[in-house]
Amino acid sequence: MNTIPTLTLNNGVVMPALGFGVFQSPPDQTAAAVETALHTGYRHIDTAAVYGNEREVGQGIRRSGLNRSDVFIETKVWVSDYGYDQTQHAFDKAAGKLGVEQIDLLILHQPAPARFEQTIAAYRGLEKLLADGKVRAIGVSNFMPPHLDTLIANTDVVPAINQVELHPYFTQPAVQDTDRAHGILTQAWSPIGGITFYPGWGENRTSTLTDPVLGKIADAHGKTPAQVMLRWHLQQQRSAIPKSTNPARIAENFDVLDFTLTTDELGAIDALDTGVRHGPDPDERDPHSLELVIDEA
Ligand code: A2P
């Protein structure tokens, strides 16, 4: 079985670089997908309170028969739980649903630009959870450079991670540079560009999976475009968390360790960046997000 490379976070915690994502995985399929992923060899699962499947992630981990300490669990606090006390309670909810005592990496799901002081208070709550040993590392998601600068100026612990939309059609160089300057690891969500082909997420999109440049590179290595994209992340020292509920694709996305992209190939993939975001803009206010209540455990 292949062993996934690891990345060391800025507080010394070691994390498998390739994780398994469960965004949009229906709860009734999540436990099976997580169990399959763990049997395939993944040792890092990424979920979120707002995905509504933390319980099933916990079930999948338990069903795998692995020891708790062998699996790196990452989850996210939703914006309606932002605030110093609320965010500490959000840990109780997440840990209760997952069925674990400690969470490896707990991150803020997104900035709440209209209530940034609440975002900072939430991060202060994460710092307290870290100090109390309830989480092993803390971080953020969807933070753009100005959000990061403000957060870091007002808090003590530099985030270990910033999870952002990142695939060949949207590479966010400015975010990657800012993360690097602060010692924050960039983690890619939608790492194979699922957001460019999710059904129902907008018209006239071009799927990364049918990109001719990626297709040519894939053919040259006897691999698939998805595998090439994951390899591109790993060689550029990013964490990536591809989602699938399909056992064959779960295995395909893990089988990325037996080939190496050349510098020219990496550059050709970088050059596919369109600068156009496919997912939600972190600076746009979403009036519904604060109303969404995350259930108690
Ligand atoms: P499925 O769960 O049916 O496999 P991303 O993580 O970049 O957002 O991509 C997730 C999307 O890509 C999901 O729709 C998933 O569907 C699909 N997917 C995952 N792995 C592959 C793959 N290797 N080839 C093609 N599609 C994939």
Image: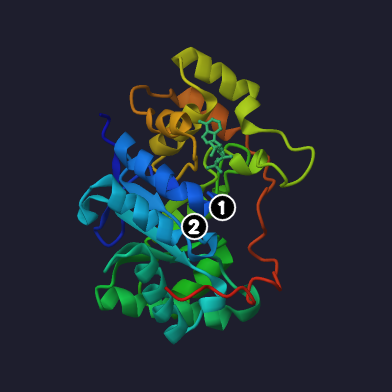
- Label 1, secondary structure: give it: helix
- Label 2, secondary structure: give it: helix
Taking the image as shown, residue 274 lies to the left or right of residue 237, namely: right
Task: Name the residue rendered at 35%, 69% in the picture.
Answer: 95
Task: Work out whether 160 lies above or below 202.
Answer: below
Name the residue that disc number 1 marks: 174
What amino acid type should be assigned to the residue bearing mark 2? Answer: Thr
Task: Work out whether 80 lies above or below 251.
Answer: below
Q: Nearer the viewer, residue 282 or 80?
A: 80
- Image location (x, y in percent) of residue 251: 40, 30
- Image location (x, y in percent) of residue 186: 45, 52
Residue 119 visible somewhere in the drawing: yes
Residue at the extreme bottom:
85
Disc 1 and disc 2 in contact, CB within 8 angstroms: yes
Task: Name the residue rendered at 51%, 19% in the picture.
Answer: 218
Q: Nearer the viewer, residue 225 or 144?
A: 225
Q: CA gap, disc 1 to disc 2?
A: 6 Å
Task: Name the residue rendered at 46%, 49% in the picture.
Answer: 30
Task: Name the residue rendered at 63%, 44% in the picture.
Answer: 195
Question: Which quarter of the rendered picture does the C terminus lie within?
Answer: bottom left
Residue at the extreme front:
28
Name the residue that disc number 2 marks: 178
What amino acid type should be assigned to the residue bearing mark 1? Answer: Ala
For the image shown, how many numbered marks are present on the structure? 2
Q: Confirm or reject: label 1 Cβ below 8 Å from ligand 1.
A: no
- Image location (x, y in percent) of residue 250: 43, 34
For label 1, the crowd category at 10 Å Cα-Cα, with few meaning under 14, some 14 to 19 and many 20 or more, is few
Question: Which quarter of the rendered picture does the N terminus lie within?
Answer: top left
For label 2, the crowd category at 10 Å Cα-Cα, with few meaning under 14, some 14 to 19 and many 20 or more, is some
